Image: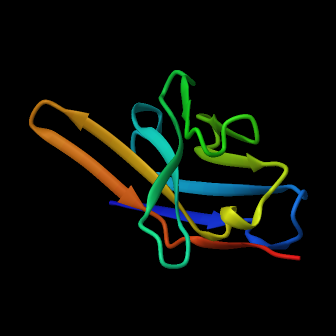
């Protein structure tokens, strides 16, 4: 049982910034990897950024240097700070919680928030 709620999406012009938030209502938040995925129009869903329980991050090459993922384990929040946005960043952004242990796997998704970058 988990409920992930994204917010912060919107319409921005190229070069502008946007910060997405994910409120994770779930048990054992601090034991899960958290990630942001996105799906652009006519494209497959792709991993944007991931952060593990200790704060180690992995960023997709396409957004490296522009996007930053962070988490607050006390407030069970995940953030995606996006800077210097490009039209190619347009899409629905999804928050994901994942945990794999021996004999068990959790995989939870939010409903998504729309990001549109257009001039």
- Residue drawn at the location 83% of the way across and 48% of the way down: 83
- Residue drawn at the location 82% of the way across and 75% of the way down: 118
Establish if 1 lies above or below 68.
below
Is residue 74 left or right of 106 when viewed as pictured?
right
| Residue 73: percent from left, percent from top | 58, 34
Quarter-of-image position of residue 100 = top left
Quarter of the image with the N terminus in it: bottom left
Is residue 101 left or right of 26 when viewed as pictured?
left
Quarter of the image with the C terminus in it: bottom right
| Residue 85: percent from left, percent from top | 80, 57
| Residue 31: percent from left, percent from top | 40, 32
Is residue 75 left or right of 44 when viewed as pictured?
right
- Residue drawn at the location 46% of the way across and 56% of the way down: 46
| Residue 79: percent from left, percent from top | 68, 47
- Residue drawn at the location 31% of the way across and 53% of the way down: 107
Using the image as rendered, state which of residue 18 and residue 79 is in the foreground. Answer: 18
Establish if 76 lies above or below 95.
above
Task: Count the marks.
Answer: 0
Using the image as rendered, state which of residue 4 and residue 90 is in the foreground. Answer: 90
Check the image and name the residue furthest to the left: 103
Using the image as rendered, state which of residue 5 and residue 95 is in the foreground. Answer: 95
How has the structure been colored for display? rainbow
């Amino acid at each position: 049982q988990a409920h992930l709620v994204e917010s912060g999406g919107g319409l921005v012009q190229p070069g502008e910034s946007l910060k997405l938030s994910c409120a994770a209502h779930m048990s054992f938040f601090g034991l899960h990897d958290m990630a942001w995925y996105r799906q652009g129009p006519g494209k497959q869903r792709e991993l944007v950024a991931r952060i593990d329980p200790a704060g180690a991050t992995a960023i997709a090459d396409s957004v490296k240097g522009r996007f930053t993922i962070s988490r607050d384990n006390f407030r069970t929040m995940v953030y995606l700070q996006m800077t210097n946005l490009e039209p190619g960043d347009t899409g629905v952004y999804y928050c994901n919680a994942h945990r794999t242990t021996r004999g068990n796997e959790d995989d939870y998704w939010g409903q998504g928030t729309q990001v549109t970058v257009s001039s």
